[in-house]
Amino acid sequence: MEWPPPSTSPSPSLVVRSPRQTVSLIRNRRPHRDWAPSSRSPSFAARDHGPKPSEVYGFVGSITTVIATAVYLAWAYTPEPVLRSLGITYYPSKYWALAVPSFVVVTVVPSMGIYMGLNFAATPPPTSFSTIFDEKSREHTAFSPATEDERPIEPISDIGIDRINSLMYGDR
C-alpha cells in the first residue's frame, strides 16, 4: 500500500476553523496505522531508531576530554626519570603544566569582568523611557470573538506599565 493513502476529501471532523480547534484536534487524535509495517524501507527504520549526530559528537567529545585530561595529569605528575625509562623523551617542559592553567585563569577572570562591565555600560538608566517601551513595543488590541470555540489566540503584545503597577501594587 502506498503512503500516504490517497484521500478523496477531508472528513468534517478534520476541518480546522481556528487555532483552538487545531490544538484540541491534536490532543484528541488517536494514532492509527493503515499501512503494513513491512512496507517501510530499511533506511526509514534506521532513521527512526539510530543515534542523533549531536549525541554521537557529545559522546566522542566527552571521551576525548577524559582521555586528554588523563594524559595531561599523567604527564604533569610523572617524574622525568620515569618518563625516560618508558621511552618517552619528547615532551614539553614541566613549566607548562602550571603555566597554561594559570594563563587560562588569568585570561578568563578579567574577560568575565569586562563582559559584565560592557553589559552595564550598554544598559539604559532606570529613568530612561526605553526601559518602558521601544520601537518593537506592541500595544494590546481588544477583540470580541463570535463564540468561545472559535476565539483565536491573542496576538503577542506588551503589558503596559500601568497594568503592571496595578497588578503588583493594587489600586493605591
Image (cartoon, helix red, strand yellow):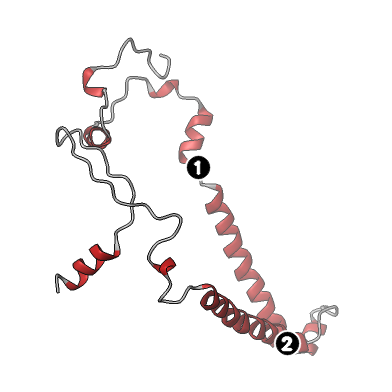
Labelled pair 1, 2 in contact (Cβ < 8 Å): no
Q: Residue at x 33, y 56 (%)?
A: 158
Give the SS element for disc 2: helix
Tell me which corner region of the image, top left, top right, bottom left or bottom right, holds residue 40: top left
Q: Amino acid at mark 2?
A: Ala
Q: Residue at x 41, y 76 (%)?
A: 126
* Location of residue 96 in the rendering, given as x and y in whole percent from the top left corner: 76, 85
Q: Residues within 10 Å of mark 1 (few under 14, many from 20)?
A: few
Q: CA distance from mark 1 to mark 2?
A: 43 Å
* Location of residue 166 in the rendering, given as x and y in whole percent from the top left corner: 19, 67
Tell me which corner region of the image, top left, top right, bottom left or bottom right, holds residue 14: top left
Residue located beneath label 2 in the image: 99
* Location of residue 109 in the rendering, given as x and y in whole percent from the top left corner: 60, 84
User: Left or right: where does residue 96 sit relative to residue 63?
Assistant: right
Q: Residue at x 53, y 74 (%)?
A: 119
Residue 65 versus residue 159: which sits nearer the camera? Answer: 159
Q: Quadrant of the C terminus?
A: bottom left
Q: Residue at x 71, y 83 (%)?
A: 100
Tell me which corner region of the image, top left, top right, bottom left or bottom right, holds residue 150: top left
Give the SS element for disc 1: loop
Pair 1/2: label in front: 2
User: Left or right: where does residue 76 sit relative to residue 20?
Assistant: right
Residue located beneath label 1 in the image: 50
Q: Quadrant of the N terminus?
A: top left
